Amino acid sequence: MRHTNRTLIDLDALVTLFHHGIAKAHDLLHLGLPTALLHDRCRPGGPWQHLLPGILLLTPARPSRPQRIQAALTYAGDQALVTGLDALHLHGIHTIPATGPIHVLVPRHHQPDIPADLLITRTRTMPKPTLRKSFLTAPPARALSDAAHHLSPRALTPLLAEALKSGVSPTGLHTRGSPSLTAALATPPIPEQRGR
């Protein structure tokens, strides 16, 4: 328990107040917690941890992928959308595992610093967000286009095939700047072999 000038705060229960246990340090300070307390709780072996600059995970456990996504969206700002492989997973397209940095889409004018755990794509026109498993995501076509910039043609081909099977329209894909995606769309699919 921690007394502030406003009320008594159960520090261990704070995790339940924040989506996926992810909090901005600023919000915790606004609740009346002192900076020194945040630093103390985020020390090695402490009950909290820093995930991104100014973003804390209010548990000592290794962060899950959803917690890392929430941290990325919180860090990148209110207009940020998850995109790339994580967004495709949230839309049910699982051909390639989502590993590595979390990929977020932000408005072009938004210029957050880019930590190693994030991949940020800036755009002039933000797509209409889709809510998937409580995360604001880019639509599947945009997510696939963003993922394509970071995939080899070999990895992209089966992902594109699954996305098209799930209803993603080829006309909705942004191929500019993505030779892999342009090539994959130009290659006719190999017909499935059927037993005779």
Image (cartoon, rainbow, N blue to C red):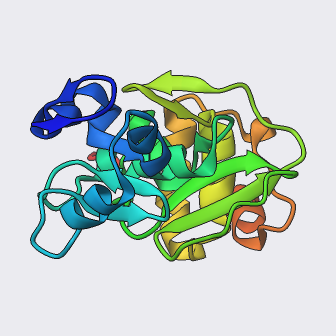
Image position of 90 with respect to 184: above or below: above
User: Can the viewer see residue 95 in this picture?
Assistant: no
Whole-percent x and y of residue 31? 38, 33
For this orientation, the residue located farthest to the front is 5
Asked if 44 appears above or below 94 in the picture, the reply is below
Note whether 69 is above or below 54 in the view shown: above
* Residue 8 percent location from the top left of the image: 18, 26
- For the point 48% across and 58% down, the residue is 54
In terms of image quadrants, where is residue 28? top left
Give residue 83's position: percent from left, percent from top. 58, 47
Question: Going by the image, does 117 lie left or right of 61?
Answer: right
Residue 9, located in which quarter of the rendered image? top left
Residue nearer the viewer, 50 or 188: 50
Q: Is residue 131 left or right of residue 2?
A: right
Residue drawn 69% across the image and 36% down it: 79
Between residue 132 and residue 72, name the one nearer to us: 72
Residue drawn at (78%, 60%) of the image: 111
Which residue is located at x 57 percent, y 28 percent?
Answer: 167
Instruction: Mark yes or no: residue 33 visible.
Output: yes
Specify the quadrant that holds the C terminus: top left
From the viewer's side, name the closer residue of 162 and 186. Answer: 162
Please say if 179 is above or below 169: below
In percent of width and height, residue 87 lies at 49, 43
Image label count: 0
Q: Nearer the viewer, residue 17 or 135?
A: 17
Give the position of the N terminus as an image quadrant: top left
